[in-house]
Image: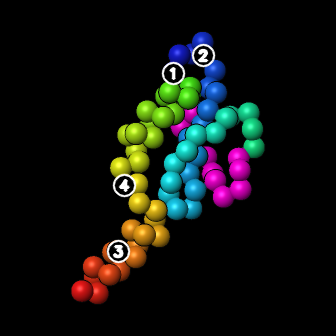
Amino acid sequence: MSEQTPATHRVVLNDEEQYSIWWVDRPLPAGWHAEGFTGSEEECLAHIDTVWTDMRPASLRRRMAEQASAA
């Protein structure tokens, strides 16, 4: 992000390890926490494209791993 352009959004994450973006000047909605990345809307979405490699909710991934280890 350019030093001249202030960050407008932040990347947020919920307990199911699902990503979204939120405005930096607004309180986070319940159940979401800041992931650490801030920038423009486009920069935040590009960051999510890079880091969110498995779209399944965390609870589904855990259940599938448990079923695989029980087999």
Amino acid carrying mark 1 in the image = Met
Instruction: Report if residue 35 is visible in the image.
Output: no
Is 29 situated above or below 60?
A: above
Q: CA distance from mark 4 to mark 3?
A: 13 Å
CB within 8 Å, label 4 to label 1: no
Helix, strand or loop: magenta stretch: strand
- Which residue in the protein does label 4 denote? 54
CB within 8 Å, label 2 to label 1: yes
Q: Nearer the viewer, mark 3 or mark 2?
A: 3
In x, y percent, where is residue 47? 44, 36
Q: CA distance from mark 3 to mark 1?
A: 38 Å
Q: Which label is found at residue 1?
A: 1
Instruction: Report if residue 10 is visible in the image.
Output: yes
Which residue is situated farthest in the top direction here? 4
Q: Secondary structure at mark 1?
A: loop
Residue at x 27%, y 79% (from the top left corner): 68
**Magenta residues, start to end:** 28-38
Q: Nearer the viewer, mark 4 or mark 1?
A: 4
Residue at x 46%, y 65% (from the top left corner): 58
Is 21 situated above or below 42?
A: below
Closer to the chain start, of discs 2 and 4, is 2
In x, y percent, where is residue 17? 50, 57
- Which residue in the protein does label 3 denote? 64
Amino acid carrying mark 2 in the image = Thr
Closer to the chain start, of discs 4 and 1, is 1
Q: Is residue 42 left or right of residue 69?
A: right
The crowding category of the residue bearing disc 1, from other C-alpha atoms within 10 Å (few below 14, some 14 to 19, many at least 20), is few
Q: CA distance from mark 2 to mark 1?
A: 7 Å
In x, y percent, where is residue 12? 58, 46
Q: CA distance from mark 2 to mark 4?
A: 31 Å
Q: Nearer the viewer, mark 3 or mark 1?
A: 3
Amino acid carrying mark 4 in the image = Asp
